[in-house]
Image (tube, rainbow, N blue to C red):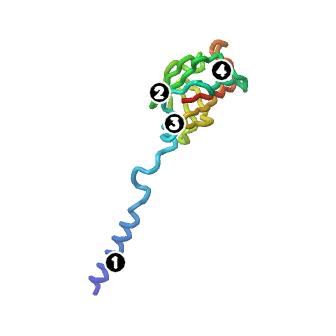
Amino acid sequence: MNTKRIYTYTLMALVAVLCFSCNPDDGPGDPLATELAFEKLAGQWTLGQFGSVKVDGSDVSANYSGFALSFADGTYTTTNAGDLFSASGTWEWADESGGVVSLDDGKTININSLTTTKFVFSFTKTDGPVRAGIAGNYVITVEK
């Protein structure tokens, strides 16, 4: 009788361990916010027809004719960005939300809006000569 009871309790314990060790969250899971954001961010962005470069609310897009910005995994390139951005460099996510990017020059880019066709971002420029761009709060809208 004792052997049957021990067998039953052992079997119940084994079933309980197996049930609790199976976690439905195991496996590939959902993509991270940064992965989802990068899917949209990757590629070339231009001022196009509806893009703009604004500093403290004033449109200065004419100063950046032909502006383009491209993102790849960990690198970026720019065209006709003046001294607002380096011609090329590296970038990384500043946090896990996928809403802030840090460039290798120390600049922090805040992503205001990001879809597969439109990217709005902002940053503050505080120093540099006039040729480096006007100091102020920039909001740049680009499109694919």
Asked if disc 1 and disc 3 are in contact, CB closer than 8 Å, the reply is no
The number of numbered discs placed on residues in the rendered structure image is 4
Apparent side of residue 139 relative to residue 44 in the rendered image (left or right): right
Q: CA distance from mark 2 to mark 3?
A: 15 Å
Number of other residues with Cα within 10 Å of mark 4, as a class: few under 14, some 14 to 19, many 20 or more: some
Q: Amino acid at mark 1?
A: Tyr
Residue at 60%, 20% (x, y): give it: 84
With 56 as the anchor, is 15 left or right in this view? left
Q: Quadrant of residue 141?
A: top right
- Taking depth in this image into account, of 48 and 112 the one nearest to the observer is 48
Name which of mark 4 and mark 3 comes first in the sequence.
Answer: 3
> Distance between the Cα atoms at labels 4 and 3?
23 Å
- Mark 1 secondary-structure assignment: helix
Tell which tag, 4 or 1, sits nearer the viewer.
Answer: 4
Assess whether mark 3 and mark 2 are in contact (beta carbons under 8 angstroms): no
The residue beneath circle 2 is: 75
Compute the Cα span from label 2 to label 1. Answer: 59 Å
Q: Which residue was labeled with disc 3?
A: 40
Residue at image x 53%, y 41%? Answer: 96
The residue positioned farthest toward the right in the image shown: 57
Between label 2 and label 3, give the one nearer the viewer: 3
Is residue 61 found left or right of 117 in the rendered image?
A: right
Q: Amino acid at mark 4?
A: Ser
Name the kind of residue labelled 2 in the image. Thr
